[in-house]
Amino acid sequence: MSYLNDVEDGGTTTFTQQKIEVTPEKGKTMIWPAEWTHAHAGNLVNVGEKYIITGWMHFPHEVR
């Protein structure tokens, strides 16, 4: 996920199990496992708006 703009107040992204809170800054990019272990939430923006671009990739184990 990449932040496309700065946010004046609020709009952090929280990873609950890791107890990490990321402040949105234009150009900051985060990559994390697409698994339940990295559940996250986008928090409310108090002033202004937050724009992001995101995508997902998943490489399931080959079944034999």
Image: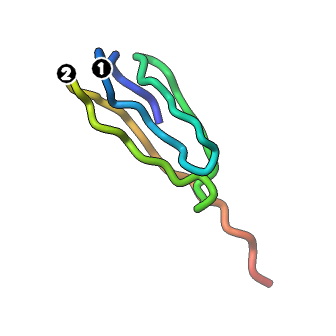
Looking at the image, the residue that sits furthest to the left is: 48
Secondary structure category for the residue under label 2? loop
| Residue at x 28%, y 28% (from the top left corner) | 50
Looking at the image, the residue that sits furthest to the right is: 64
Q: Vertical placement of 36 versus 57: above or below? A: below
Of the residues under marks 2 and 1, which one precedes in the sequence? Answer: 1
| Quadrant of the rendered image containing residue 43 | top left
> Residue type at mark 1?
Asp
Is residue 61 toward the left or the right of residue 47 in the image?
Answer: right
Is residue 45 toward the left or the right of residue 43 in the image?
Answer: left
Q: Vertical placement of 37 versus 25: above or below? A: below
| Residue at x 63%, y 50% (from the top left corner) | 33
Place of residue 63 in the rendered image (x, y in percent of width and height, measured from the top left): 75, 81
Residue pointed to by mark 1: 9
Secondary structure category for the residue under label 1? strand
**Most foreground residue, 15 or 31:** 15
The reply to whether dot 2 and dot 1 touch (C-beta < 8 Å) is yes
Place of residue 28 in the rendered image (x, y in percent of width and height, measured from the top left): 50, 21
Place of residue 31 in the rendered image (x, y in percent of width and height, measured from the top left): 59, 38
> Residue type at mark 2?
Gly
| Residue at x 54%, y 44% (from the top left corner) | 15
Within-10-Å neighbours for mark 2: few <14, some 14–19, many 20+: few
Residue pointed to by mark 2: 48
Q: Nearer the viewer, mark 2 or mark 1?
A: 1
| Residue at x 45%, y 30% (from the top left corner) | 2
